[in-house]
Amino acid sequence: MRSPLPITVAFVALSLCAACQTPAQQRADTLHDAHLVANDSSSTVAMRFAPPDGFSRAAVPDGGFEHYLRNLPLKPRTAAVHLFNGSSKIRQDVHAAVIDMSVGPTDLQQCADAVMRLRAEFLFANGRQDDIAFNFTSGFKAEWGRWRKGERIAVEGNACRWVPGSTVDASHAQLLHYLGRVFTYAGTLSLSKELRDAATSPLRPGDVFIQGGSPGHAMLVIDVAEGSDGRMAFLLAQSYMPAQDIHLVKNSRHPELGAWFILNGDDRLYTPEWTFAWSDRKNWP
């Protein structure tokens, strides 16, 4: 997806270094968010997507990432996928449902970013704020724990460093500001290096199909169901390019399955806008 910008280029593209912004400026360009907006005409992934015939949902522990993903709220069934600027995505034949989560006002929350966003939201909601950390493409580790205590990331040429200067702020709005910084300097290449290979591990919600590169792509396994014959079915979500609403995709190769895919059902994983090898599956350390 979005090619990770070289540090020098990305720095020029930013109008202001976060370390130099006033609190008022930071509030002004914070990624807009409504958290996960409750909506009477909305439902969750588990409520809307019944497993295919002969399959039943895999058991997952309460309070875990798998449970969080399965219970993500969805926008109404008729919802379109919108880009960061409010316009509709040209292709409206890709999505089976739209996750009720903000995309932000800038072209940042693309494919790997959407995966990191959902992971960060889960950790934040479950009081695991010290576990929120992602690597930039340069290898620099951006830790929410340091950001929320007032430190900011200064970029000088190809080097990054932590600098003091902001107030302590552990709010969700500040989390989104931190993620905006991460999305600028991280991508499929850095995320693919952070994740561990899972090609031979049991499939589970939270796994990531990812190809790191420029372009590359990343899609998140949202839910898993087990077949009576031992096969595994799963749902996939993505953002894409330009930045757009995170959405569950249709299985266009096997429309009889709706949004469900079957593990190793084809020689490769064919999704509406990307094709993966089965060996591209990874999970979180």
Image (cartoon, helix red, strand yellow):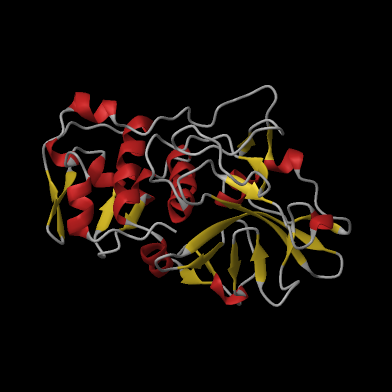
Tally the marks.
0
Say which of 130 and 164 sits in front.
164
Foreground: 210 or 147? 210
Q: Residue at x 31, y 37 (%)?
A: 177
Q: Residue farthest to the front? A: 90
Residue at image location 66% in from the left, 50% down from the top: 94
Q: Quadrant of residue 171?
A: top left
Q: Is residue 157 left or right of residue 228?
A: left
In the rendered image, residue 24, in percent from the top left (x then y), is placed at 21, 23
Q: Answer yes or no: is residue 62 visible.
A: no
Quadrant where the C terminus is found in the figure: bottom left
Tell which of 69 and 249 is nearer to you. Answer: 249
Residue 48 x/y as whole percent: 75, 40
Q: What x and y, as percent, mark residue 143? A: 28, 51
User: Horizontal placement of 101 versus 267: left or right?
Assistant: left
Judged left or right of residue 23, residue 260 is: right
Whether residue 243 is situated above or below residue 283 in the rendered picture? above
* Point 53% across, 32% down: residue: 36
User: Could you say where residue 218 lies in the image, as x and y percent from the top left?
Assistant: 51, 60
Quadrant that contains the N terminus: bottom left
Residue 125, can we see it?
Answer: yes
**As drawn, is 247 to the left or to the right of 149?**
right
